[in-house]
Amino acid sequence: VRHLVGIKDLTESDIQLILETARQFKDVINRPIKKVPSLRDVTIANVFFENSTRTRLSFELAEKRLSADVVNFSASGSSVKKGETLLDTVNNILAMKVDMVVMRHSSPGAPHYLTKHIKANVVNAGDGTHEHPTQALLDSFSIREKLGDVAGKRIAIIGDITHSRVALSNIFCLQKQGAEVMVCGPKTLIPKYIEALGVKVGHDVREALAWCDVANVLRIQLERQQIKYFPSLREYSLYFGISKQMLDELDRSIVLMHPGPINRGVELTSDAADSSHSIILDQVENGVAVRMAVLYLLAQL
Ligand code: CP
């Protein structure tokens, strides 16, 4: 496969290859000289039609650590605002001899559409509510680093499942590696199709925390909600918010994850987010090595 559009398209051995390659790159970027010449003759465009902090900077750093040439495009401030189409935008960037496109877009399927119309490699950096494959890969890398393996572990994904691309990519990635997955949240924020994917569904956050080895907590994505959903943020934090006290009261230690950005005081209290249970900043650190692995492996094809 010349592209990374979604985890759904990967086999378990593809995932293991990416995670093992990432482990080697993590050793590289912890050395005093963090760069390798692997992508010296490759030019990569990071094309972002939606806001990002972690994913955009992490891809850019991964590309620079691999010695690629990098250009960054944000739709805001670009000629998209004058009506230029997605395909015209990308074809104009490619005309400047770009080899790979890393794209974030609000429309599910936009990266898949690009793969049908351009010759460059395409990496999905998040497409609407569909997939965020490199986030799921860095989440699995972080679980493996903390717990030794993903297989056999119980992972609870807690929050706004309906509007999340992180949830779907994680479900595919974790199940392919032999983990048990539960999604937990208010009924209004869990889509009907999710049970058909073979996940447990729960609506009680304390039960989910008592069941799992890892809690991957998602934020309420107000920007994607077309109608006003129940619950309100205040109700959500009351019934589904996770505090350090709730984690401390469990009869065994669990790992707390969050893809960011955190809505502090809504899905997590600050004392939970910053507690010893949390590996949230390890996830961010691991994102660079995982993205190096994805870009390096795609460039070999
Ligand atoms: N986790 C994540 O995708 O964060 P950003 O939206 O800041 O890239």
Image (spheres, helix red, strand yellow):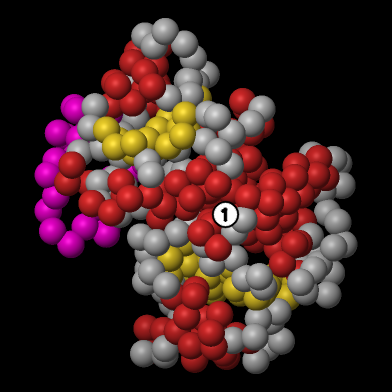
Q: How many numbered marks does the figure carry?
A: 1
In this view, 281 is above or below 119: above
Residues in magenta?
Answer: 216-241
Q: Which residue corresponds to the image point at 65% horizontal and 81% vertical from the top-left?
A: 120
Q: Quadrant of the C terminus?
A: bottom right
Picture coordinates of residue 8, whole percent (x, y): 51, 59
Q: Is residue 256 visible in this depiction of the protein?
A: no
Q: Which residue corresponds to the image point at 38% horizontal and 49% vertical from the top-left?
A: 197
Q: Is 239 inside the magenta-drawn segment?
A: yes
Residue holding disc 1? 134
Picture coordinates of residue 54, whole percent (x, y): 53, 51
For the residue labelled by badge 1, is the local secondary structure a helix, a strand or a loop? helix
In this view, 132 is above or below 238: below
Q: Is residue 192 visible in this depiction of the protein?
A: yes
Amino acid carrying label 1: it is: Thr
118 or 51, which is in the foreground? 118
Q: Is 293 inside the magenta-drawn segment?
A: no
Q: Which residue corresponds to the image point at 29% horizontal and 37% vertical from the top-left?
A: 201
> Dot 1: few (<14), some (14–19), or many (≥20) neighbours within 10 Å?
many
100 or 254, which is in the foreground? 254
Picture coordinates of residue 121, whole percent (x, y): 65, 75
- Judged left or right of residue 251, residue 242 is left
Q: Quadrant of the N terminus?
A: bottom right
- Judged left or right of residue 131, residue 286 is right
75 or 218, which is in the foreground? 218
- Residue 85 in which image quadrant: bottom left
Picture coordinates of residue 285, whole percent (x, y): 63, 41
- Judged left or right of residue 122, residue 51 is left
- Residue 298 in which image quadrant: bottom right
